[in-house]
Amino acid sequence: MPGVIEDGERIELRDEMVSMVRGNGQPIDEEVLFARLREKIDFRDNSVRLVSLRPPFLKMGGGRLGLVDRDLPGGTEAIEEVGEHLEGLLARKGKGLTVDALCAETQRLSALHAQWTEEMLLSVLRADARFRLSRWSAVGLSEWESVRLPSRTEIVKRCLDGGEGRVTVEAAMDQIEAVYGQRPDRATLWGSVQQNEAKIVGDWVVKEAGEYAAGTECTAK
């Protein structure tokens, strides 16, 4: 994406970003990068964010941006080991896993991998054609028809469908915890409930207000 004219030459956004991150000598705070870029070129924030998701850039975590060849512990060799390991793991399980679960797997591989953050892993996986990522932080194999891991919203929907429009809050939380390994709090559950055009009434998640019978079981596979 071209920037403004400077000394009669066009400035490419990606090239300028690489130059600034490398010139910083270490990962740079993304807001600092934005400010420095604005001194030289015009751009849309979303353009920078999209470019920063792909190599050679590396999301470090904590709002910092680095470079794969300089800032990723273990470098190319570590990337190859992670790709092979996670591809095999997903193939054996036959279903997707959350990014935090895959990060835990990655960090067990070596002392260098133990330094990887979830953001680093995501940067690596986005650049690997063997994997597909969902909006809800799930990872599957690109050869699959989907990531094969339901979103929290889908889990709540299945619970509501199984209970004819109602399910207990505890049952919905149980199913999300079974899939994601972490139990949502009530505030987090509320987001998935709203997306199903439902509401939380006391101890129930319901599609409509009314009389509430005994609890109904639900499962999410």
Image: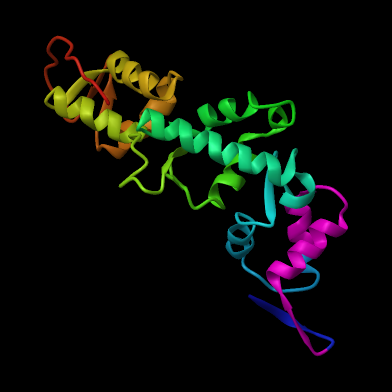
Q: Residue furthest bottom?
A: 8
Residue 99, image x, y percentages = 51, 34
In the displayed structure, does residue 81 sit left or right of residue 174? right
Q: How is the image coloured?
A: rainbow
Residue 163, image x, y percentages = 14, 22
Q: Is residue 23 magenta?
A: yes
In the displayed structure, does residue 43 sit left or right of residue 168? right
Question: Who is closer to the viewer here, 9 or 94?
Answer: 94
In the displayed structure, does residue 43 sit left or right of residue 136? right
Is any atom of residue 119 visible in this view? no
Q: What residue is at 74 percent from the left and 69 percent from the top?
A: 15
Question: Who is closer to the viewer here, 193 or 155?
Answer: 155
> Could you tell me what secondary structure mostly forms the magenta stretch?
helix
Image quadrant in which the N terminus is located: bottom right
Is any atom of residue 169 visible in this view? yes
Q: Residue furthest top?
A: 214
Q: What residue is at 40 percent from the left and 21 percent from the top?
A: 186
Image quadrant in which the C terminus is located: top left
Q: How many marks?
A: 0
In the displayed structure, does residue 98 sit left or right of residue 127? left
- The region drawn magenta spans 8-36
Q: Is residue 104 magenta?
A: no
Residue 62, image x, y percentages = 70, 39
Q: What residue is at 30 percent from the left and 17 percent from the top?
A: 169
Q: What residue is at 86 percent from the left and 54 percent from the top?
A: 24
- The quadrant in which residue 113 appears is top right
Question: Who is closer to the viewer here, 212 or 23?
Answer: 23
Residue 132, image x, y percentages = 44, 47
194 in relation to 69, above or below: above
66 in relation to 45, above or below: above
- The quadrant in which residue 5 appears is bottom right
